[in-house]
């Protein structure tokens, strides 16, 4: 269709005859005179209808084509790029008429529920904000591809119908029609394929790829999501990957939102992240660091503290500047946060004119505590005593809550960092065995490898081993993670054994991969970054659904198509399936 872009008209076009097509964004009917804001992808321009042609009967979101002449506007609109001009309509053609709208598409925030927005997603996506987000996502992937191409990476597609790849979630399964009783799994990640690609001589692989994890959905999760997945051969030192990814992030931020990120990003060992910020994804945009005050309480008169320390636990303190006059209610709310993260309680001590709080009478000499925490008169100290990670994490959540409550988190500040030296394994009480903290293909740090390989190394001490794994964290959000991989079969087999996967099961589940390690597997490593989350942050959005064209609801449904849906009994029969109800 021959037409010009609505958003392109300017003062220099005055007097020109134009053909435009688009959606009726807004209508103002002043009797003999009707103003219509016409919208296409490029923007909005004002149309004027004087008696003829007749604009009565037009509705918002009708699709029209007009011919007319560009004129200067009597009252320019400085908020619109086309605000200097309008188009005097001479000819009108209605291309498509709309039904009454379920919600107006020109309101921000939209007046519809999430469910309605998703059901009528084609209307929702017409909103300028959603158009902006789709475009930003496109520019992000374009920038990623351009950067990686320049760094000699190639994009390779890996299968969607495959075998289970353990990333710690439940698989989505697809029944096989040709082999009754057998199933494909949708990939939780392309982990094993990318490692096999590296073994296949693809030294620098990437893929912008869909992954599937059937987890109970939390507010910020989607059952299918997109990842920038990447792997490099001959990677032994993560520093090489860090500088590549730092360059990538800097490039994407510059190209999309014109922000200059400072490189290199700080590196923080896992233990330090936990003990200073109470989180393995610390938000570095504000201070409020925790202090480990365990030593000051090993002989405390207060039983809970003394006992926690005696059991090998720790006492962490958080200084709240000027917080001495917090009300009981405020303290109660903070305690609730700590309890949500499994702390038994939140102790407090206010350094007001006198000492207040449950700890006050157990503190004969507060000076060492003031020194350790740098507490000043007028400050409040909050404490959690428990096992190391639990105590720090609970207080870390209180820290985040205070960051929000006291407005300590500056807008427009970007604080990326690498968290390194994660534990290789974590103990699962439920399953009564070790699990891989990242995934089973992550190598231990070189200095811990002998311990992993030593069958006489006590099993209960395996938690001490560090992984050659790293996470990329941005403003308190885990943007991605990766590791240097195990590239020797015997190490991989031993790792699986430690995870309770014996040789037979290993052969059955991972034989194809173990074999690939036997025919010249180079040292390698990589990372995956969550693309949806990344774009969400670039867009300044709060929900992943705002940056995914067709997302699912929190219960995993697609209101637009009605998926998941029942299927025809014939299809079930072909798949050799029977549904058990109730
Ligand atoms: N496969 C991992 C994940 O999806 C990332 C990686 O180790 O590269 O989280």
Image (tube, helix red, strand yellow):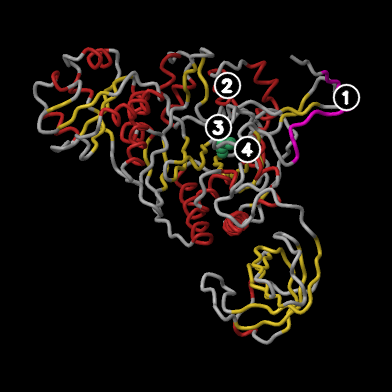
Mark 3 and mark 4 lie on one chain; the one further toward the N terminus is 4
Which is in the foreground here, disc 2 or disc 1?
A: 1
Circle 4 residue: 195
Circle 3 residue: 218
Residue at the spot 66% in from the left edge and 63% down from the top edge: 25
Quarter assignment of residue 372: top left
Which is in the foreground here, disc 3 or disc 4?
A: 3
| x and y percentages locating residue 55 in the rendered image | 74, 70
Disc 4 is placed on an element classified as: helix
Image quadrant in which the C terminus is located: top right
Question: Label 4, label 2: how many angstroms apart (C-alpha)?
Answer: 16 Å
Circle 2 residue: 496
Disc 3 is placed on an element classified as: loop
Q: Residue furthest front?
A: 31
Residue at the spot 68% in from the left edge and 42% down from the top edge: 200
Question: Do callouts 2 and 1 mark residues in contact (Cβ within 8 Å)?
Answer: no
Question: Do callouts 4 and 1 mark residues in contact (Cβ within 8 Å)?
Answer: no
Mark 4 and mark 1 lie on one chain; the one further toward the N terminus is 4
């Amino acid at each position: 269709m021959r037409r010009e872009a609505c958003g392109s008209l300017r003062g220099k076009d005055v007097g020109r005859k134009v053909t435009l097509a688009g959606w009726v964004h807004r209508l103002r009917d002043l009797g003999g005179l009707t103003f219509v804001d016409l919208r296409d992808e490029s923007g909005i321009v004002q149309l004027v209808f004087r008696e003829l042609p007749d604009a009565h009967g037009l509705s918002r979101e009708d699709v029209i084509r007009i011919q007319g002449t560009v004129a200067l506007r009597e009252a320019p609109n400085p908020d619109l790029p086309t605000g200097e001009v309008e188009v005097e309509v001479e000819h009108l053609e209605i291309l498509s008429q709309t039904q009454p709208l379920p919600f107006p598409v020109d309101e921000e925030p939209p007046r519809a529920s999430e469910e309605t927005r998703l059901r009528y997603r084609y209307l929702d996506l017409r909103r300028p904000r959603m158009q902006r987000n789709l475009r930003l996502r496109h520019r992000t992937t374009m920038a990623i591809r351009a950067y990686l191409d320049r760094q000699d990476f190639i994009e390779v597609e890996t299968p969607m119908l495959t075998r289970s790849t353990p990333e710690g979630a439940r698989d989505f399964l697809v029944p096989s029609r040709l082999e009754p009783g057998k199933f494909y799994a949708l990939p939780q990640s392309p982990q094993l394929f990318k490692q096999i690609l590296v073994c296949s001589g693809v030294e620098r692989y990437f893929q912008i790829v869909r992954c599937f994890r059937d987890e109970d959905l939390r507010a910020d999760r989607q059952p299918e999501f997109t990842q920038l997945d990447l792997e490099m051969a001959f990677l032994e030192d993560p520093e090489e990957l860090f500088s590549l990814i730092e360059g990538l992030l800097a490039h994407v931020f510059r190209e999309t939102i014109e922000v200059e990120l400072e490189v290199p990003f700080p590196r923080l060992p896992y233990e330090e992240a936990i003990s200073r910020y109470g989180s393995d994804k610390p938000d570095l945009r504000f201070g409020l660091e925790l202090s480990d005050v365990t030593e000051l309480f090993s002989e405390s008169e207060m039983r809970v503290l003394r006992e926690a320390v005696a059991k090998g636990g720790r006492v962490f303190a958080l200084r709240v500047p000027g917080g001495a006059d917090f009300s009981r209610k405020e303290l109660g709310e903070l305690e609730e946060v700590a309890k949500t993260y499994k702390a038994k309680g939140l102790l407090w001590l206010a350094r007001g004119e006198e000492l207040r709080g449950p700890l006050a009478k157990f503190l004969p000499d507060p000076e060492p505590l003031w020194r350790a925490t740098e507490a000043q008169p007028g400050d409040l100290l909050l404490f959690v005593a428990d096992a190391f990670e639990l105590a720090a994490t609970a207080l870390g959540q209180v820290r985040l809550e205070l960051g929000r409550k006291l407005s300590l988190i500056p807008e427009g500040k970007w604080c990326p960092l690498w968290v390194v030296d994660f534990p290789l394994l974590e103990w699962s009480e439920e399953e009564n065995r070790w699990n891989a903290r990242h995934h089973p293909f992550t190598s231990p740090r070189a200095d811990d490898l002998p311990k992993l390989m030593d069958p006489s190394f006590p099993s209960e001490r395996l938690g001490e081993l560090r992984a050659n794994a790293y996470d990329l964290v941005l403003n308190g959000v885990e943007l991605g993670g990766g590791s240097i991989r195990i590239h020797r079969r015997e190490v991989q087999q031993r790792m699986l054994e430690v995870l309770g996967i014996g040789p037979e099961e290993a052969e059955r589940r991972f034989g194809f991969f173990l074999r690939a390690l036997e025919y010249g597997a180079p040292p390698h490593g990589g990372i995956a970054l969550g693309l949806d989350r990344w774009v969400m942050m670039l867009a300044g959005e709060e929900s992943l659904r705002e940056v995914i064209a067709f997302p699912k609801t929190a219960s995993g449904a697609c209101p637009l198509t009605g998926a998941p849906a029942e299927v025809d009994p014939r299809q079930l029969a072909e798949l050799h399936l029977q549904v058990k109800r109730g």
